[in-house]
Image (cartoon, rainbow, N blue to C red):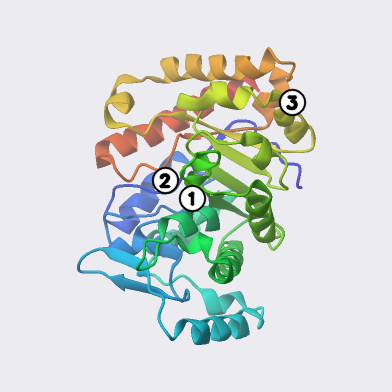
Amino acid sequence: MHTWTPHGLATGIGSLPHTDARAAVRVTLENFSELPYWPQLPKRDFRENMYAQFSEGLVGIQMDLAHEWMGLVKDDTVMDQVEAFYARYLEENPDLFAVSEEYAAGLYALRDEQATLARARWIKGQVTGPISFGLKVVDQTLKPMLYDDTLRDVLVKHITRKAQWQEKFLSALGTPIVFIDEPSLALIGASVVALNRDEVVRDLEEIFSALHCLTGTHCCGNTDWGMLLQTSVDIISFDAYNYAENLALFADDVKRFLERGGVLAWGIVPTVEEQIANESVASLEARLDAAMQLLARKGIDRALLLERALITPACGLGTVSVAAAERALMLTRQLAERVRERV
């Protein structure tokens, strides 16, 4: 694990509602000049949906752009595809797993802003994690990809190479941070999902250990935070607007995580249209203070919490209006400025 002290820097999570990649990148750079991220743009193209976005070249995946559908099709070619995949994987060349511009216009638009990026201290990227991808993408019988042991291993290794490629791509622009976004970890413990805790940790660790840069995981729901806090991940991003109390239940694990160099990304800015309109920097600052106080009361040094804090929206903003999304990014920046004054 790297030791990193962001001191309340602001950045973003995943998607924006813009359809113009350059406009989306510019608004992220305006608000997050020190730690920009590339925005996913699902309204621009179905291929920018967080599951479709990293599906290029994956065994068994078929897509119907006209009907905005993607699924796993198991037919008599799948095992040949698996064999070809492992041959490609064993070449250890992330460039064979590149994400093309049609799938990530924001990533390439960010690359074109080299002059502005010179001011950035880090650059954040993200891939969709294998647990969420593997639960969401199903075959003809509606069986999730994750429940096929062969394809699960292929998926984890596919995502690993996508993450390595992105690390390399971003390294040409600055110092990268790569997040493995795992919204479906909120389903752990739910009766409808058969997820083995140890296997989840194993799959995530395979990706974290393959990267040389700072790593993060984003989960916008409630989950077994103890499980994530025990991995080697450097940054844990959570929805502090709605779930701060849930994280506080794992205060001992949080304390150990911070003491070994971990960072918490406080998703304190809401991502629901009406809530974005109704909140102010002052109201969000009070909410953040209350959220941090839950951990401080359990013996975690408040100065350490501030030193090891990132300030972010609670989740992606792809489903709200452009005006609301841009207000959320502005609130994130202004709140982070207040937090940094206190560090």
Q: Nearer the viewer, residue 147 or 279?
A: 147
According to the image, label 2 marks what residue? 28
Disc 2 crowd rating (10 Å Cα; few below 14, some 14-19, many 20+) is: many
Q: Quadrant of residue 87?
A: bottom right
In the displayed structure image, the side of residue 202 where residue 321 appears, left or right: left
In the displayed structure image, the side of residue 213 where residue 149 appears, left or right: left
Q: Residue at x 61, y 14 (%)?
A: 293
In the displayed structure image, the side of residue 69 where residue 316 appears, left or right: right
- Label 1: which secondary element: loop
Mark 2 belongs to which amino acid?
A: Thr
According to the image, label 3 marks what residue? 252
Q: Quadrant of residue 110?
A: bottom left
Q: Are marks 3 and 2 in contact (CB under 8 Å)?
A: no
| Residue 202 coordinates in the image, percent (x, y) | 69, 55
Disc 1 crowd rating (10 Å Cα; few below 14, some 14-19, many 20+) is: many
| Residue 249 coordinates in the image, percent (x, y) | 63, 23
Q: Residue at x 67, y 32 (%)?
A: 308
Q: Earlier in the sequence, mark 1 or mark 2?
A: 2
- Label 2: which secondary element: helix
Mark 3 belongs to which amino acid?
A: Asp
Q: Are marks 1 and 2 in contact (CB under 8 Å)?
A: yes
According to the image, label 1 marks what residue? 37
| Residue 210 coordinates in the image, percent (x, y) | 69, 63
Question: Is residue 58 positioned above or below 299 on the image?
Answer: below
Instruction: State the separation of the CA atoms marked 1 and 2.
Output: 7 Å
Mark 1 belongs to which amino acid?
A: Tyr
Marks 3, 1: nearer the viewer:
3
Q: Earlier in the sequence, mark 3 or mark 2?
A: 2
Disc 3 crowd rating (10 Å Cα; few below 14, some 14-19, many 20+) is: some
Instruction: State the separation of the CA atoms marked 3 and 1.
Output: 31 Å
Q: Nearer the viewer, residue 103 or 131?
A: 131
The furthest residue to the left = 66
